[in-house]
Amino acid sequence: LKEDLALPVGTTLDRFIMRKQEDFPYATGELSQLLRDIALAAKIVNRAINHAGLTDIGGAYGKQNVQGEDQQKLDVVANIRFIRALRNGGEVCAIISEEEDEMILTGNHKGKYIVAIDPLDGSSNIDVNVSIGTIFSIYRRVTELGTEATLEDCFQKGTEQVAAGYIIYGSSTMLVYTTGNGVNGFTYETSLGEFFLSHPNITIPRTGNIYSVNEGGFNHFPERIKHYVELCRVRNYAARYIGSLVADFHRNLLKGGIYLYPNTLKAPGGKLRLLYECNALSFIVEQAGGKASDGRQRILEIQPSDLHQRCTFYIGSTEMVEEVESLLVARE
Ligand code: AHM
Ligand code: MG
């Protein structure tokens, strides 16, 4: 009995979303429904990931996405699941996905929202059982309701996000999101099939001693980034790099640290994508008290002009990101 009573009970994601909605008397509930649609797709994707080793769903799909990267079967499954959930939910008029060249029109002209999503980030890690994630940004459309969405709806700055979040499929599965009023994290309880509030009001430490960067590219980093990495080494910081953005970000969010993806030989303008990777995490980090920059400006203020545009990315504890920024400015 004791053990059973010790099992976690608490606020479910659904109840939390509903309560938050009550805090905003003019909210119509559509955004809440949209968040619930994402959570449902996340549960389905979580199931697929957990079965990956058993169902021959791991491995390459044999095609490449628009960016020339090999698609994994699970990438494709996750893409289909999220698109289906968002289309069926009815709140979304257009979707931008890492896996699709063009914006996807859902046919829901009355949907108020645009979603940008990386359905399965870090997919090169799937086959080796390392944490992967989903990243999403939600915007309100700017074109008239009832008409077809256009690229104008997609090319909004990150500052215009109304909600953003990620799901980490890790040693436990978590959903972390913000609607611009702090950051909250929910852990998935598999036997009940529910996300429970486990990390209320997440804040990132102002500084930390973890740096996360693919140091294999060091020789081709810009000099000033090399200098920062050398400073981290001299200070005996811990180098932690999973190669799954969500997992690296999540750890640094909770513990304090910085994630860096500078321009490199292979990725001259940076590797990570503004619309469905960087903006969401930048909104979250700022809401948690941290910072995100491309080295010159706040990520959230970059004006997008391409669905799949990339940027350099420095994100994490405020003092650490500011140090990188000041090095970059000082040496220009
Ligand atoms: P993906 O969206 O194709 O999975 O690529 C993004 C991933 C991030 O999760 C990760 O931080 C980064 O690529 C790793 O890149 P690298 O292997 O160059 O360090
Ligand atoms: Mg990705």
Image (cartoon, grey):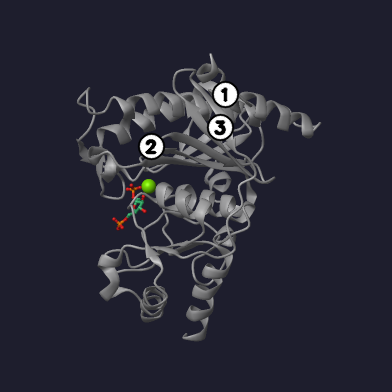
Q: Residues within 10 Å of mark 2 (few under 14, many from 20)?
A: few
Q: Secondary structure at mark 2?
A: loop
Upstream in the sequence, badge 2 or badge 1? 1
Of all residues, the one furthest to the top in this rendering is: 1
Measure the alpha-carbon separation of dots 3 and 1: 8 Å
The foreground one among 209 and 164 is 209
Q: Position of residue 263 (x, y in %)?
A: 36, 68
Which of the pair 95/274 is nearer the observer?
274
Tell me: residue 105, above or below residue 90.
below
- Disc 1 packing (10 Å; few <14; some 14–19; many ≥20): many
For label 3, the crowd category at 10 Å Cα-Cα, with few meaning under 14, some 14 to 19 and many 20 or more, is many
Say whether residue 246 is visible.
yes
Q: Which mark is residue 93?
A: 3
Q: Which element is circle 3 on?
A: strand
Q: Quadrant of residue 228?
A: bottom left
The CA distance from mark 3 to mark 2 is 34 Å
**Amino acid under disc 2:** Ser
| Residue drawn where x is 39% and y is 80% of the image | 227
Percent from the top left, x then y, of residue 292? 54, 61
Q: Is residue 39 above or below residue 183?
A: above
Three-letter residue code for mark 3: Cys
Residue under label 1? 90
8 lies left or right of 74 = right
Residue at the outermost front position = 2
Q: Which residue is mark 2?
A: 171
Q: CA distance from mark 2 to mark 1?
A: 32 Å
